[in-house]
Amino acid sequence: MDALIRELSAVVGDKVCLWGEGVDWAPYATERRGLFLGRPLAVVEPAATAEVAEVVRLCAAARVAMVPQGGNTGLCGGAIPDASGSQVVITLRRMQRIRALDAANDTMTVEAGCLLARVKEAAAGAGRLFALDLASEGSCQIGGNVATNAGGNWVLRYGTMAAQLLGVEAVLPDGRIYNGLRTVRKDNTGYRLDDLFVGSEGTLGLITACTLRLHPLPTVRRTACVVVRDLEAAVALLGLVRAALGDVLAVFEVMDAVAVHLVHRHMGVTLPFEPGFAWLVLLEAWGHDAALEEAFAQILYRAMAEDLVQDAVLAESGAQHEALWALRENISEAERLEGASIKHDPAVPRSALPGYVRAVRAALDDFLPGCTLCVFGHLGDGNLHVNVFPPPGVAAGRGLWEAVNQIVYDLAVSHGGSFSAEHGVGALRRAALMRHKDATALELMRQIKRTLDPHNLMNPGKVL
Ligand SMILES: Cc1cc2nc3c(=O)[nH]c(=O)nc-3n(C[C@H](O)[C@H](O)[C@H](O)COP(=O)(O)OP(=O)(O)OC[C@H]3O[C@@H](n4cnc5c(N)ncnc54)[C@H](O)[C@@H]3O)c2cc1C
């Protein structure tokens, strides 16, 4: 292996080819929730696509496995090497250039290591919106967003990362460079190969750059937080607002009382309503017409008159907007401070959500009496986080995780949904993929993997 390390160092430079004793591997080898702890052979940080290609060629020739890593904010162990000390982590954090921004064409081309927050800032600087919003935006990279098909808070209006993507440049597992960077919206010249990399979780190659679709920046934004009795009312409210105002809702997030009280207790965030509520909904309407402000307020009054909404707060200032968002954005951290929980990110059709959550609650009351559910998330997308705190005195060990996962996943699938709508499969959910994915789809996935990566060198042990 010494020869390979020497060759890799020669490509990227000594300082950014980390190996040997004394290196602090933790930032590259620890999953943020501590579920996976690896040990790489080396960490390599190329600065250009040609360097990535050369690094991959060298590893492939030596039959050494590679693990693409972005911001390492993923939540299923996909970017973590195994513990064998034989895998090379390739991180793109030195590839952060914005190669082009064409405001007239509403497109930009960025290198994969660009932080999501930076992509959004650059777009906003040109008077455009890059429509992806994750709480991890200060750490996650656009390449990681493509590789996980990230979702977040604005999917209801703009779709997931897949919908923001026009093309990718990627280094294939043998070192060839695929160049799909194009800034046209229509191109019917054969298979849309770029889509193979969406949700590929580093198993088909390293995404080195991508071309992104931009949107007009909304000029009117209204934020409200409302109390609803139950999820049925929340789903009905969504229908009412969309029917009345059209496609203006960018955000429709629900939080149950458990989630909101955790944020209040652990993060000191002020409650906008007296305790006693069951669910809150955070909604945002975006548009370009000042009349939207009044129309948004009116539809909330109507929802109150129709008894869909019990109480409501409309943000009247930037500070109020921030205070309402603090409730939503701090849930994960508040959960962490509360203690270990078993986390899930299923999706079912919106219409099936209330029944799904009721079924999960009933099944878990039966299986794990005394457990606490913390339910929140992107109701507009049918995607909720259903997190389970075991009863006091019961450890959230691996066996319990798997049993609880199975209940939550099986019910998601039987309600017509997906066991993972956001975080993906990684190393954590391979068994669930085998259990729930259509057999033909699995076989096609394996065939694609074998075709591109016949020696299984690109992120082995992940997804398949
Ligand atoms: C606080 C917090 C909030 C979050 N909120 C959301 C949310 O709302 N919605 C959501 O969808 N996710 C969310 N996530 C999960 C995570 O941020 C996303 O999955 C994100 O897209 C991962 O990007 P990353 O750069 O950190 O990728 P990493 O974690 O580094 O990698 C994730 C996977 O992508 C692969 N990969 C990374 N970069 C590349 C590349 N250049 N080429 C090929 N493969 C690559 C890795 O091998 C790995 O399999 C959240 C995470 C945190 C910590």
Image (cartoon, helix red, strand yellow):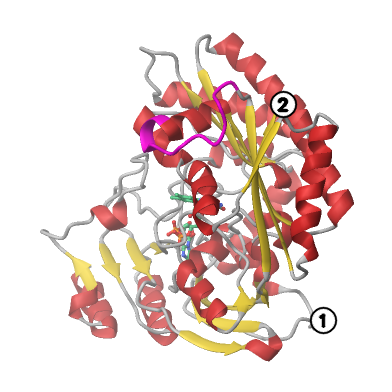
Chief secondary structure of the magenta span? loop
Is 215 situated left or right of 315 in this image? Answer: right
Residue hosting label 1: 188
Is 211 situated left or right of 55 in this image? Answer: right
Q: Which residues are magenta?
A: 265-276
Is 204 situated left or right of 286 in this image? Answer: left
Residue sitting at x 24%, y 84%: 10
Residue sitting at x 64%, y 88%: 103
Seen from the viewer's position, the closer of residues 397 and 442 is 397
Seen from the viewer's position, the closer of residues 166 and 207 is 166
Kindly identify the amino acid type of the residue bearing the numbered disc 2.
Asp
Asked whether 170 falls inside the magenta stretch, the response is: no
The N terminus sits in image quarter: bottom left
Q: Position of residue 122 (x, y in %)?
A: 51, 79
Q: Position of residue 198 (x, y in %)?
A: 62, 63
Q: Residue furthest right?
A: 243
Checking the image for residue 230, the label placed there is 2
* Displayed quadrant of residue 248: bottom right
